[in-house]
Image (cartoon, rainbow, N blue to C red):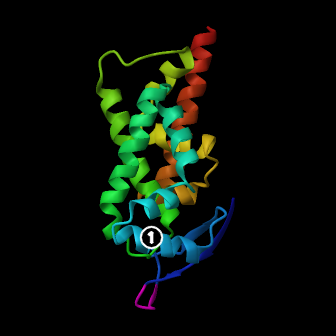
């Protein structure tokens, strides 16, 4: 996956920056023209166009959900909820940033809600000691760690997806790594 910085044109032809910053473009095998056409078709009500569009992202979304849940059933539910929400919210997509960032914002929000619910449970499921340590992280720390470590995203991309500053993402990542290292040391004692 290659990244580059570019601003994207809105349908009106005006060039704008996404969230007052340059949008990241990700090459995932689909040309932006094909993706734009699919988005427009999906916005017109074509479920088939939306399904084709999401095939570019479904593996990464499912992998993220599996890492977060350690349960195939829960991962598939998160996956389904994220894409149903994306389909419902598609009319709000304004071509101001890449579809990749837009859809991952929805996926991240869906996953964060799941993590917050799990974090509030008195007896969350624990499969391993490492899994228990991961569940001790805040939902934001866990999401940043998953996006960085398992999907290999850059901190600036994660910040854009989560809608927070890059320094906030860096701080969350450092806290998560330090907490996991501390837990590992405590388990070794």
User: Residue furthest toward the right?
Assistant: 2
Could you tell me which quadrant the C terminus lies in?
Answer: top right
Residue 75 is situated, as x and y percent measured from the top left of the image, at 45, 33
Residue shown at 31% from the left, 61% from the top = 89
Q: Is residue 124 visible?
A: yes
Q: Which residue is mark 1?
A: 39
Quadrant into which the N terminus falls: bottom right
Asked if residue 89 lies left or right of residue 128, the reply is: left
Vertical placement of 99 versus 126: above or below? below
Q: How many marks?
A: 1
Q: Residue furthest bottom?
A: 13
Image: 139 above or below 70: below
Q: Is residue 145 visible?
A: no
| Mark 1 neighbour density, 10 Å: few (under 14) some (14–19) many (20 or more) | many
Give residue 15's position: percent from left, percent from top.
48, 87
Q: Residue at x 33, y 52 (%)?
A: 85
Residue depicted at 44% across the width and 26% down the height: 135
Q: Is residue 12 magenta?
A: yes
Q: Residue at x 46, y 64 (%)?
A: 49
Front residue of 113 and 180: 113
The residue closer to the viewer here, 128 or 75, is 75
- Whether 114 is among the magenta residues is no
Q: Which percent across, then down, holds residue 177? A: 58, 34
The x, y position of residue 44, in whole percent, is 34, 72
Magenta stretch: give its range: 11-15
> Element under label 1?
helix
Main secondary structure of the magenta stretch: loop
């Amino acid at each position: 996956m290659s990244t580059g910085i570019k601003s994207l044109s809105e349908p009106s032809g005006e060039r704008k920056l996404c969230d007052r910053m340059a949008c990241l473009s990700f090459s995932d095998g689909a040309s932006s023209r094909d993706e734009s056409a699919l988005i427009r078709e999906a916005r017109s009500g074509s479920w088939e166009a939306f399904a084709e569009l999401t095939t570019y992202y479904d593996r990464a979304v499912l992998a993220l959900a599996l890492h977060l849940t350690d349960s195939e059933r829960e991962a598939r539910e998160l996956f389904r909820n994220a894409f149903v929400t994306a389909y419902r919210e598609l009319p709000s997509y304004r071509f101001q940033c890449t579809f990749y960032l837009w859809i991952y914002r929805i996926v991240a929000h869906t996953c964060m809600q799941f993590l917050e619910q799990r974090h509030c449970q008195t007896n969350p499921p624990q499969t391993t000691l490492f899994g228990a340590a991961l569940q001790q992280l805040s939902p934001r720390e866990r999401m940043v760690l998953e996006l960085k470590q398992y999907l290999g995203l850059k901190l600036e991309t994660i910040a854009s997806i989560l809608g927070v500053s890059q320094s906030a993402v860096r701080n969350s990542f450092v806290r998560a790594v330090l907490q996991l290292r501390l837990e590992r040391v405590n388990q070794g004692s």
